[in-house]
Image (cartoon, helix red, strand yellow):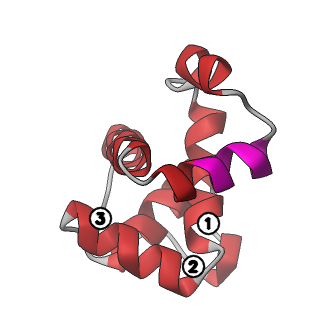
Amino acid sequence: MAISQQGAQELATDILLALAERPEQLAGFLGTSGLEPSTLRQVASRPEIAVFLLDYIVEQDDRLLEIAEGIGRDPRDIMAARTVLSGPGSYGWEAD
């Protein structure tokens, strides 16, 4: 499935909202990113946060599968969104 830049950003937003419903995973993301909840709210719409968030999600297969299932998306959509936002060749995936 081809995904646009805007679609990738929207998918990252959906993932962030899903993480907000999973306090343990959100805490993991915040700990990895060094962000505080108040800072996250301020920077949530920045494209670089979307890439960092998608990196965090795809870092572990079980996390990727759980989030994909939770938002009703194919894990490949998340990988495609990450590739669109960060460029082809990342994680060995090429953009559609």
Instruction: Give the magenta part as a residue range.
Output: 27-33
The kind of residue on which mark 1 rests is: Pro
The residue beneath circle 1 is 88
Circles 2 and 1, Cβ within 8 Å, touching? The answer is yes
Q: Against 42, is 58 above or below? A: below
Quadrant for residue 93, please give it: bottom right
Residue depicted at 66% across the width and 82% down the height: 92
In this rendering, would 32 be left or right of 42? right
Location of the N terminus (image quadrant): bottom left
Task: Find out whether residue 28 is within the magenta segment.
Answer: yes
Quadrant for residue 28, please give it: bottom right
- Residue 1 visible here: no
The residue beneath circle 3 is 2
The kind of residue on which mark 2 rests is: Trp
Q: How far apart are marks 3 and 1 (CA)?
A: 13 Å
Q: Measured from the top left, where is residue 46 in percent x and y? A: 58, 25
- Neighbor class of circle 1 (other Cα within 10 Å; few <14, some 14-19, many 20+) is some
Location of the C terminus (image quadrant): bottom left
- Neighbor class of circle 2 (other Cα within 10 Å; few <14, some 14-19, many 20+) is some
- Secondary structure found at label 1: loop
In this rendering, would 54 be left or right of 68? right
The kind of residue on which mark 3 rests is: Ala
